[in-house]
Image: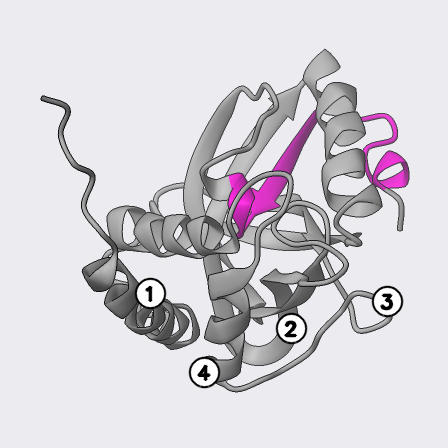
Amino acid sequence: MKPQDIVAGKNSLWIFGYGSLVWKPDFKYRRSKVGYIQGYKRRFWHGDNFHRGNDETPGRVVTLIEEEDACTWGVAFEVTGPQVQESLKYLNVREAVHGGYVTRVVDFMPRDENQVPVQALVYIATADNPIYLGPASVEEIAAQISVSKGKTGHNMEYLLRLADFMRQSCPDVDDPHLFSIEGACLAIIRPILLVAPLPVPAL
């Protein structure tokens, strides 16, 4: 389903972000809410040869994998009026053209239980994508993330920002997959930082 088909005749739209969108939406929106969607788990199974990697050393970024009892936390952004087409045009390049994601509609549950659920558009990378990497061990994923860099920045930054979002915005939610990869990456780079020479101050 194409985003244009989903928003046909609508003046507002909710967009659910579970990766870099949670800290860097880069489009104008009316309001945002922290919450979750059900039936999906977040996994570092998608390859990235543009934003956080390249063709030689593709990075790893998150996608959603269907699992009945799972849920994924993130942020939903409401766009209205001209923001709808502006955001979709931007996200089509960022997520579809350069990212390899397709769109689906999901039910978003706000963290505030007094607020009603809303339908939201979400971008998901599937195994049909040529740069989809699939499952790997925590150690293998961490090793790949620790050395990858793309046009947007280091793959490690992507991982750490996502982990920081979860701790700051969803402090009561555990995400073993995310936090175990974070721990493995930090274990890789910590010895490097300890032996790196300190800058000599100018006299």
- Where is residue 115? Give x, y as percent: 41, 41
Q: Quadrant of the C terminus?
A: top left
Image: magenta residue range: 3-21
Mark 3 crowdedness (10 Å alpha carbons): few <14, some 14-19, many ≥20: few
| Magenta stretch: includes residue 18 | yes
Q: Mark 2: which amino acid? A: Ile
Q: Mark 4: which amino acid? A: Glu
Circle nearer the N terminus (2, 4): 2
Determine whether label 1 and label 3 are within 8 Å by CB.
no
Question: Mark 2 = which residue?
Answer: 65
Question: Mark 4 = which residue?
Answer: 139
Asked if 135 appears above or below 202 in the picture, the reply is below
Q: Is residue 175 left or right of residue 70?
A: left
| Magenta stretch: includes residue 20 | yes
The disc label shown at residue 130, or none: 3
Q: Mark 1: which amino acid? A: Ile
Asked if 40 appears above or below 55 in the picture, the reply is below
